[in-house]
Image: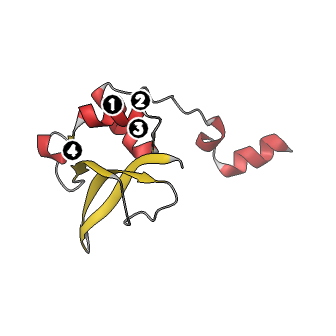
Amino acid sequence: MSVVIRLARAGTKKRPVYHVVVADSRFPRDGRFIERLGHFNPLLPKDNEARLKLDLEKVKAWLAKGAQPSDRVLRFLDAAGIAKRPARKNPEKAVPRKERKAAAA
């Protein structure tokens, strides 16, 4: 059983709120979960403290048990200083498509 820390969508249409949950990777996104660790409201400004609430002790405990965070949750944990998010490098993406084709030929 692989366990992941991910976001589960809640809220109404056009007004999303996400719960940060620990779930089995086979369960659906908004389905059954093991434990709720916090919540995230993307509609609030980035400098607002209520935008993201996490129980950091529970997060550390689940990471110690082997839970894998999703990419978005890993960004939150990197900002909190709990986990390090590796930098991604895709130099091909920055080059316009026509120039990539010309360089390949």
Q: Quadrant of the C terminus?
A: top right
Residue that mark 1 sits on? 60
Residue 48 in sight? no
On the image, the x and y values in percent for residue 99 come to 71, 45
Q: Nearer the viewer, residue 54 or 71?
A: 54
Q: Nearer the viewer, residue 84 or 63?
A: 63
On the image, the x and y values in percent for residue 20 come to 30, 50
Secondary structure of the residue carrying tag 3 is helix
Q: What distance separates the C-alpha of mark 3 from that of mark 2?
A: 15 Å
On the image, the x and y values in percent for residue 8 come to 34, 59
Badge number at residue 52: 4
Q: What distance separates the C-alpha of mark 4 from that of mark 1?
A: 16 Å
Farthest residue to the bottom: give it: 13
Residue at the (47%, 62%) spot, across then down:
27
Image-based side of 39 in relation to 97, left or right: left
Q: What distance separates the C-alpha of mark 4 from that of mark 2?
A: 22 Å
> Which of the two marks, 3 or 2, is nearer to us in this view?
2
**Residue 28 vertical placement versus 63 (above, below):** below
